[in-house]
Image (cartoon, helix red, strand yellow):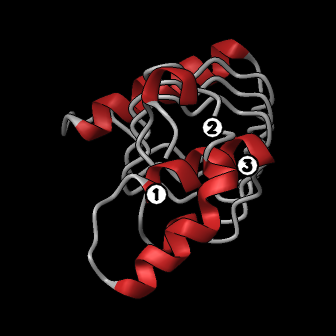
């Protein structure tokens, strides 16, 4: 997909989100979006199922309610992006960098349940490999 095609899809998606009559919900199923710059994009409700987002820049992207099932996010930059916490994000392919980032965020929630505390403790080494741990402090 070219940058121009992606730009048009995102523009129409923004119109759809704003309820404009000529807007269209973004359908990027199985799209090749490797290295795409989607920084700050509003991809809420977009269908990114099985999309190839390897090395894409999704910094600050709004992925709430997006369908990411089966998408490949290895190497993607997800800093300051929202991660959808519903079944639409199941089976996403990630790399260790993103795994550490997700583990870090899980380890920073406060929960007094002993089982949760045990899991957080087990994830501590991975979580402390988060690429921003120096500025956020170790867990």
Percent from the top left, x then y, of residue 110?
28, 62
Q: CA distance from mark 3 to mark 1?
A: 29 Å
Residue pictured at 68% horizontal, 53% vertical: 125
Location of residue 118 in the rendering, given as x and y in whole percent from the top left corner:
51, 78
Q: Secondary structure at mark 1?
A: helix
Above or below 20: residue 25: below
Crowd class of label 3 (few under 14; some 14 to 19; many from 20; radius 10 Å): many
User: According to the image, label 1 marks what residue?
Assistant: 107
Q: Mark 3 sits on what residue? A: 51
Q: What residue is shown with label 2?
A: 130
Helix, strand or loop status at disc 3: loop
Local SS, label 2: loop
Q: Earlier in the sequence, mark 2 or mark 1?
A: 1
Left or right relative to 91: residue 132: left
Camera-near label (3 vs 1) is 1
Taking depth in this image into account, of 109 and 117 the one nearest to the observer is: 117
């Amino acid at each position: 997909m070219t940058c121009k095609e992606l730009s048009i899809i995102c523009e129409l998606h923004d119109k759809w989100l704003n309820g404009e009559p000529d807007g269209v919900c973004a359908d990027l199923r199985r799209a090749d979006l490797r290295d795409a710059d989607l920084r700050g994009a509003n991809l809420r409700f977009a269908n990114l199922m099985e999309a190839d987002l390897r090395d894409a820049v999704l910094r600050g992207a709004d992925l709430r309610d997006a369908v990411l099932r089966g998408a490949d996010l290895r190497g993607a930059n997800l800093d300051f992006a929202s991660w959808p916490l519903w079944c639409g994000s199941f089976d996403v392919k990630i790399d260790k960098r993103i795994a550490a980032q997700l583990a870090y965020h899980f380890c920073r929630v406060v929960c007094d349940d002993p089982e949760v505390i045990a899991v957080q403790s087990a994830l501590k080494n991975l979580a402390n490999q988060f690429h921003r741990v120096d500025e956020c402090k170790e867990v």
